[in-house]
């Protein structure tokens, strides 16, 4: 069993709690404004900021050579750039010279301006920007407090990040509305300059009614098909150029490496959440009184994170894995994903199967042959992109071999390139 206490600790910090300038319909954190009752002043004090930074530095094992400070919300830019200027100044005093400092900030991008971007660039922040695709897909759920669309403001923020050379990731919430458009979402963002993308499935559990999830939630197979469309585009054009988080996770798993993402680890529990007032919780998806570990003004982060309750929280992920998952051919990469999504029945009636199971199975099985090729290249010390060149060469050769016997294929005929797709969904499009 993995000794989780020897792993680096990742604290996701909410300096402004759930307060946000937008009102995205599927946001799970907006409702945390009920956590402390009304009248709460949702701003991290300088005292809590210093305690957090100092304790995070002290909590890292010696072998960790980079300390990450992750800022999230709500909308963390609402704290103002001055708050982060103080944070960076303090980090320089507290972090030992032999360790690197990395700051990440997740934002909706609406408040970004030249001053913000100059600061982010100067201090090498990695920005996670939320965008769900082109306007007609993005604006379905991502609206402001007056219900107005936000796409234009987000795109302006994205262009500012690029103008100032700020490093950024795009975070795409995959939901029922954009879930049928994997290729379209991916190519749109790639063609607008994205080099790093993460896809986050929206799963809103519903306790009442026959449907276990909300109407906004992505459907399991829909999610799998979305990822497959992305993968099929990536493998023919973007290997080595675009970093797609779940594909990188797959490569790691096929190489036999530990997942970087808690979702796919056998155990979790090392990604904890700090609220604005110093309260520490087990995980971003478990910010509620039952999972409160304590307050960092009473006990240091390292003690709270290594306490029995939190260690058990992380181990439970593996212990509670249903037998169905244990027998699964893609368990080595999936590991039952996140416990928060484990609420449907397995065929034998066990109640803790992941809602997204069918999608993950479909996706990971789809990528298996290509992953084997990629891993082979990497193990031989060669570039993964060789696989892309080889597959494209094979595709071109197949195209040449298949003459049109009686004119070009019909829209619904199998594509002559041999992809197995309908002509209208393959070469006819291109
Ligand atoms: S794909 Fe499904 S059965 Fe397999 S490990 Fe993941 S959740 Fe379990
Ligand atoms: S509960 Fe889910 S999101 Fe939280 S640490 Fe575990 S795997 Fe990660």
Image (cartoon, helix red, strand yellow):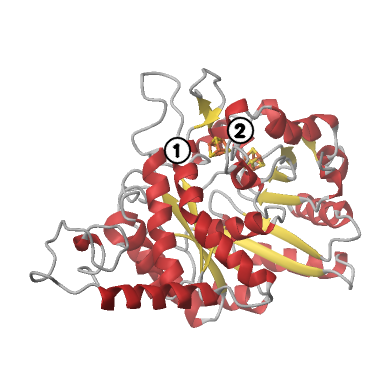
State which image quarter holds ligand 1.
Answer: top right
- The residue at which mark 2 appears reads as 327
Answer above or below: position of 9 versus 385.
above
Under circle 2, the secondary element is: loop
Q: Is residue 323 above or below residue 18?
A: above
At 89% from the left and 72% from the top, the residue drawn is 98
The residue sitting at the left extreme is 406
**Pointer 2 residue Cβ closer than 8 Å to ligand 1:** yes
Residue 100 is left or right of residue 197, and the answer is right
Quadrant holding the C terminus: bottom left
Q: Which residue is under mark 1?
A: 358
Locate residue 73, reporting x and y percent. 57, 50
Instruction: Locate residue 401, reporting x and y percent.
Output: 27, 75
Q: Is mark 1 within 8 Å of ligand 1?
A: yes
From the viewer's perspective, is 413 left or right of 301? left
Q: Report the front residue among 385 and 102.
A: 385
Q: Is 239 situated left or right of 226 in this image?
A: right
- Binning the other alpha carbons within 10 Å of mark 2 as few (below 14), some (14 to 19) or many (20 upward) gives few
Residue at the image position 51 percent from the left and 24 percent from the top: 346
């Amino acid at each position: 069993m993995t000794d989780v206490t020897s792993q680096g600790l990742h604290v996701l910090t909410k300096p402004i709690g759930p307060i946000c300038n937008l009102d995205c319909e599927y946001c799970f954190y907006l409702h945390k404004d009920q956590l402390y009752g009304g009248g709460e002043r949702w701003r991290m004090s300088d005292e809590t900021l210093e305690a957090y930074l100092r304790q995070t530095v002290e909590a890292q094992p010696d072998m960790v050579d980079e300390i990450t400070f992750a800022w999230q919300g709500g909308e963390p830019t609402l704290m103002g750039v001055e708050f982060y200027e103080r944070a960076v100044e303090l980090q320089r005093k507290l972090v030992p010279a032999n360790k690197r400092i990395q700051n990440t900030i997740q934002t909706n991008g609406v408040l970004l301006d030249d001053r913000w971007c100059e600061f982010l660039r100067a201090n090498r922040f990695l920005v996670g920007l939320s965008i769900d695709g082109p306007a007609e897909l993005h604006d379905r759920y991502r609206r402001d407090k007056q219900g107005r669309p936000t796409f234009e403001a987000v795109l302006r923020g994205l262009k500012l990040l690029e103008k100032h050379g700020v490093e950024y990731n795009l975070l795409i919430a995959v939901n029922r509305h954009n879930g049928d458009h994997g290729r379209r979402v991916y190519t749109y963002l790639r063609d607008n300059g994205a080099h790093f993308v993460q896809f986050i499935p929206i799963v809103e559990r519903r306790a009442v009614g026959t449907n276990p999830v909300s109407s906004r939630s992505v459907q399991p197979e829909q999610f799998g098909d979305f990822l497959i469309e992305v993968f099929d585009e990536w493998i023919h054009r973007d290997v080595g150029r675009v970093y797609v988080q779940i594909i990188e996770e797959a490569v790691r798993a096929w190489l036999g490496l530990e997942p970087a993402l808690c979702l796919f680890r056998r155990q979790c529990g090392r990604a904890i959440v700090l609220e604005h007032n110093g309260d520490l919780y087990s995980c971003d998806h478990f910010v509620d009184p039952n999972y409160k570990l304590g307050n960092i003004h009473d006990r240091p982060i390292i003690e709270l994170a290594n306490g029995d309750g939190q260690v058990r929280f992380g181990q439970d992920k593996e212990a509670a894995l249903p037998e169905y998952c244990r027998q699964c051919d893609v368990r080595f990469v999936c590991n039952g994903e996140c416990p928060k999504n484990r609420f449907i029945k397995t065929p034998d009636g066990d109640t803790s199967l992941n809602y997204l199971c069918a999608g993950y199975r479909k996706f990971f099985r789809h990528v298996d042959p290509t992953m084997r090729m990629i891993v082979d290249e990497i193990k031989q010390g060669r570039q993964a992109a060789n696989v892309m060149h080889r597959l494209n060469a094979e595709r071109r050769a197949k195209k040449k071999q298949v003459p049109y016997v009686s004119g070009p294929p019909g829209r619904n005929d199998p594509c002559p390139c041999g992809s197995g797709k309908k002509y209208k969904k393959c070469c006819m499009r291109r």
